[in-house]
Image: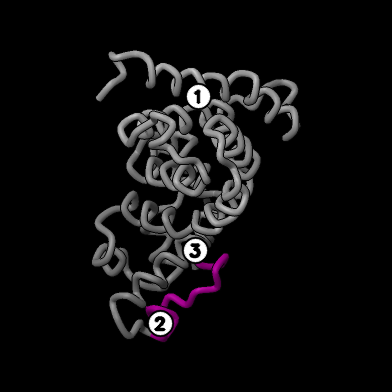
């Protein structure tokens, strides 16, 4: 029995633990649940082979539902970040200032990354999910902005510019992940740092969108 199999207690001689799924939806749900366990244990080293072994099925069985390890991890990441997004939504639901929404989004994400393996995979340049500006990462970034109380259209930051803002925010978060600083700032220090430098940049972009014809759509 492999190390991963031993970790998850699977039984290789009985596919699906002796209880095959009743539908494709159930199979996909069980694959994603097992992927979550593998990612917690192995991080970015997780592959379809690990998940198949943990389920007690062949790799081809998993390939029936996911064409690649990246596709499997992406699907699991979208599910695996839902609790984080729900917590973020609670923090942002009363925030009406664009700069403050970005400050809180960045600070809280940086704070939570050590406890959120999928965020780390998405933002840490994993060989499996290498692109911080991937569609999956952008979808999560868009969700962060949308869950605030900011009226983005009223600020002059329309959908196209929000796309740029999401990319910029993801790059800022990644920079803190790659180099937290020395010494590492406390949560309060990080928010103060971001309010000095990030929030004014957002405010300047709002003003420029209102006054500079080159920013017009």
Is 16 drawn above or below residue 63 in the view shown? below
Q: Nearer the viewer, mark 1 or mark 2?
A: 1
To which quarter of the image does residue 164 belong? top left
**Residue 128 appears in the figure:** no
Q: Earlier in the sequence, mark 3 or mark 2?
A: 3
Report if residue 50 lies within the magenta region: no
Say if mark 1 contacts mark 2, CB within 8 Å.
Answer: no
Q: Which mark is residue 2?
A: 3
Give the Cα separation between the discs numbered 1 and 2.
56 Å
Q: Residue 142 at what x, y percent from top left?
A: 41, 43
Give neighbour class at mark 3: few <14, some 14-19, many 20+ (Cα, 10 Å). few
Residue identified by numbered label 1: 202
Residue identified by numbered label 2: 14
Q: Residue 63 at what x, y percent from top left?
A: 26, 62
Q: Nearer the viewer, mark 3 or mark 2?
A: 2
Is 116 drawn above or below residue 59 in the view shown? above
Q: Residue 119 at what x, y percent from top left?
A: 51, 45
Give the Cα separation between the discs numbered 3 and 2.
15 Å
Say if mark 1 contacts mark 3, CB within 8 Å.
Answer: no
How has the structure been colored for display? one colour
Q: Which residues are the magenta region?
A: 5-19
**Residue 152 appears in the figure:** yes
Q: Earlier in the sequence, mark 1 or mark 2?
A: 2
Give neighbour class at mark 2: few <14, some 14-19, many 20+ (Cα, 10 Å). few
Residue at point 60% right, 54% down?
90
């Amino acid at each position: 029995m492999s190390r991963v199999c031993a970790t998850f207690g699977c039984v290789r001689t009985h596919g699906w633990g002796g209880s095959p799924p009743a539908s494709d939806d159930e199979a996909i749900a069980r694959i994603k649940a097992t992927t979550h366990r593998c990612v917690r244990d192995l991080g970015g080293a997780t592959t379809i082979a690990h998940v198949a072994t943990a389920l007690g099925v062949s790799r081809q069985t998993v390939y029936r539902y996911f064409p690649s390890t990246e596709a499997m991890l992406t699907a699991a990441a979208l599910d695996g970040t839902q609790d984080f997004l729900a917590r973020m939504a609670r923090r942002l639901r009363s925030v009406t200032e664009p700069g403050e929404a970005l400050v809180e989004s960045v600070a809280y994400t940086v704070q939570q990354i050590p406890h959120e393996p999928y965020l780390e995979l998405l933002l840490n340049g994993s060989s499996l999910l290498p692109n911080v500006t991937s569609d999956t990462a952008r979808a999560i970034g868009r969700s962060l902005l949308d869950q605030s109380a900011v009226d983005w259209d009223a600020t002059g930051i329309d959908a196209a510019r929000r796309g740029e803002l999401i990319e910029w925010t993801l790059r800022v978060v990644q920079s803190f992940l790659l180099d937290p600083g020395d010494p590492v700032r406390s949560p309060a220090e990080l928010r103060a740092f971001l309010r000095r430098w990030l929030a004014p940049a957002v405010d300047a972009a709002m003003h420029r969108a209102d006054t500079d014809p080159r920013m017009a759509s």
